[in-house]
Image (cartoon, rainbow, N blue to C red):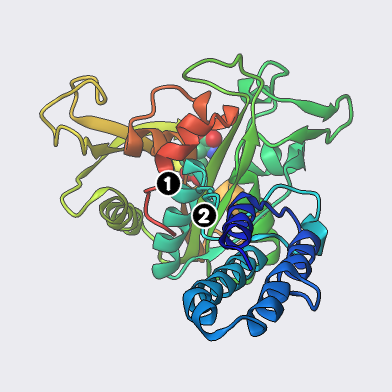
């Protein structure tokens, strides 16, 4: 036995690079197998005389330990049979981060609004996006020559019929469908997508989202509407929020109002977002016009109700000071990622 043999084996071991389990097994056989190099050295060792045994004993045992450790180590770090020809895997490396998506701001706002009204006892109702003229206009008391019916505003699916199909321009159509089929009293919110023939800009888009509210029962008054909207505004924008109602006109409500909330950015002092007024317009509302109740078979002498409608993009814009409507539809990850920390709902 020569010291060089031991050193050579130790050096070869250092150089050893196995890429597959098969190669590790070959190395094990080469060093530790029945006819392996280390096994052979142990056979030679048995024939040595006492002095030499003392000289080589520990070194040889250390060598065997080293080889065994190295082979075990390679067994653990080299991939399984499938990765035979693939790169060496280090299982102790940190994994690739798994990127979680985030909710779209419009979905976050819709969910918040639905949750608030659910607490007030409202159900959720939905209706078709491709609607007919009757449910979008006629039953909602739009006069035949009302500009909203015009080709300029409405995307028609089939024109020329008595009751053409079109893409709904507001979610108020779901009011009508709900009144037609739901038993009284009715308390619903109706979120959904709406479509208008508008040129796309920072302030307008041809697709956006609304949520409609409808409450019909005996003795529902304008005071009930005001209270419901005040409670909603405080849940949505904070407990100090004030509301202001301005007279307005919608064919389907009488009286009609547009509702502002106190600016939650400057708290009424006046800033860029509220254009110095201290108020932000958030929705349209009113008492359901008796014509609208009657059109859907509800006795307007016995029942009254209120309705309201708001744009979800607008609410999200006010909440997060988004300055361009187009951001909502472009799916730019830099924009969507901003909402990763928004409250999970
Ligand atoms: N449908 C109206 C719009 O799209 C919004 C609206 C106003 C809905 C008043 C209502 C309401 O229910 O009462 O502009």
Q: Are marks 1 and 2 in contact (CB under 8 Å)?
A: no
Q: Is residue 71 above or below residue 276?
A: below
Task: Tell me the crowding category of disc 2: few under 14, some 14 to 19, or many 20 or more residues within 10 angstroms, Cα based.
Answer: few
Please name the residue that numbered disc 2 is placed on: 93
Q: Is 99 left, or right, of 120 in this rendering?
A: right
The answer to which of 86 and 240 lies nearer the viewer is 86
Image point (20%, 47%), residue name: 241
Left or right of 36 in this view: 307: left
Secondary element under disc 2, as helix, strand or loop, is loop
Q: Provide residue 222's location: percent of width, then percent of height.
A: 34, 53
Q: Is residue 289 visible?
A: no
Q: Considering only vertical position in the picture, is 93 above or below 173?
A: below
Q: Residue at x 56, y 74 (%)?
A: 60
Label 1 or label 2, whichever comes before in sequence order: 2
Q: Residue at x 56, y 39 (%)?
A: 209
For the N terminus, which image quadrant? bottom right
Residue nearer the viewer, 70 or 203? 70
Give the answer, above or below, for where 282 lies relative to 174.
above
């Amino acid at each position: 036995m020569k010291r060089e043999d031991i050193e050579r084996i130790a050096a070869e071991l250092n150089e050893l690079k196995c890429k597959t389990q098969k190669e590790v097994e070959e190395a094990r056989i080469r060093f530790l197998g029945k006819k392996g190099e280390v096994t052979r050295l142990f056979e030679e060792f048995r024939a040595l005389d006492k002095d030499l045994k003392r000289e080589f004993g520990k070194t040889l045992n250390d060598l065997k330990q080293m080889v065994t450790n190295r082979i075990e180590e390679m067994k653990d770090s080299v991939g399984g049979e499938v990765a035979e020809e693939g790169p060496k895997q280090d299982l102790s490396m940190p994994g690739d981060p798994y990127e979680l998506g985030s909710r779209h701001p419009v979905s976050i706002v819709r969910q918040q609004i639905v949750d608030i009204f659910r607490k007030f006892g409202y159900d959720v109702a939905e209706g078709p996006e491709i609607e007919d003229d009757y449910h979008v206009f006629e039953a909602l008391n739009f006069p035949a020559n009302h500009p909203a019916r015009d080709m300029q505003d409405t995307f028609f699916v089939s024109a020329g019929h008595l009751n053409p199909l079109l893409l709904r321009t507001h979610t108020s159509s779901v009011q009508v469908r709900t009144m037609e089929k739901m038993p009284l009293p009715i308390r619903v919110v109706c979120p959904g997508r709406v479509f208008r023939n508008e040129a796309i800009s920072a302030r307008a888009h041809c697709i956006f989202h609304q949520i409609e509210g409808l409450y019909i029962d005996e003795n529902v008054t304008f005071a009930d509407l005001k209270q419901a909207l005040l409670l909603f505004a405080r849940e949505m924008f904070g407990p100090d929020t004030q509301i202001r109602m301005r007279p307005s006109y919608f064919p389907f409500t009488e009286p009609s109002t547009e509702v502002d909330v106190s600016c939650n950015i400057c708290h009424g002092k006046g800033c860029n977002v509220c254009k110095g007024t201290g108020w932000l317009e958030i929705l349209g509302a009113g008492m359901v016009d008796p014509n609208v109740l009657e059109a859907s078979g509800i006795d307007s002498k016995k029942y009254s109700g209120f309705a309201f409608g708001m744009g979800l993009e607008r609410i999200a814009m006010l909440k997060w000071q988004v300055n361009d409507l187009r951001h909502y539809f472009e799916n730019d990850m830099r924009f969507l990622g901003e909402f990763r920390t928004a409250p999970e709902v």
